[in-house]
Image: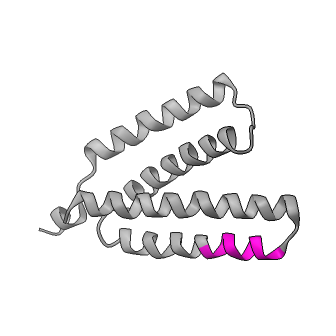
Amino acid sequence: MSRGIVYAYVLAMTIAEVFGQVFIKTYYESKALYWFFIGWFFYGIVLYFLYLTYFLASFAFANAVWSSLAIIGTTLISIAYYKEPISNMELLGIGVIIIGVMIVGMYETPKAEKLE
């Protein structure tokens, strides 16, 4: 098992989730129903890659990395695209999340190694 594949799947999930959230927020602002369905399409992509990830990594690891990247991605989009403000405490929280994911990643045993 290559950790690179796990990270590629998690990155694909993160990108799809960020797009999904952008389209659903666009639906919220415009009320054009097609944006809603486009957003859910991207969430379908998230579920597909999440399914694939569970074959290669533990539930805790996959969700920790995915959730942290999604938080970072949506925060960056909210600042850059939607011009939403972010507080110092929110930045601190994101920093703590990053540290937590690094700790989880350092001590994660890939599933293939667990089975041997």
Instruction: Determine if the magenta segment contains residue 87.
Output: no
Quadrant housing residue 54: bottom left
| 77 left or right of 110 in image | right
Instruction: Determine if the magenta segment contains residue 39.
Output: yes
Q: Nearer the viewer, residue 55 or 25?
A: 25
Instruction: Please name the residue shown 57% across and 46% down the image.
Output: 71
- With respect to residue 99, does 41 lie above or below? below
Residue 22 in the image, given as x and y percentages of width and height: 68, 58
Majority secondary structure of magenta residues: helix
The number of numbered badges drawn on the structure is 0
User: What is the quadrant of the N terminus in the image?
Assistant: bottom left
Extent of the magenta region:
33-41
Instruction: Please name the residue shown 74% across and 32% down the image.
Output: 85
- With respect to residue 27, does 87 lie above or below? above
Residue 98 in the image, given as x and y percentages of width and height: 45, 37
User: What is the quadrant of the C terminus in the image?
Assistant: bottom left
| 115 left or right of 75 in image | left
Residue 2 in the image, given as x and y percentages of width and height: 20, 62
Quadrant housing residue 26: bottom right
- With respect to residue 93, does 18 lie above or below? below
Instruction: Please name the residue shown 65% across and 25% down the image.
Output: 89
* Residue found at the very far right of the displayed protein: 31
Quadrant housing residue 11: bottom left
Q: Nearer the viewer, residue 69 or 60?
A: 69
Q: Nearer the viewer, residue 37 or 114?
A: 37
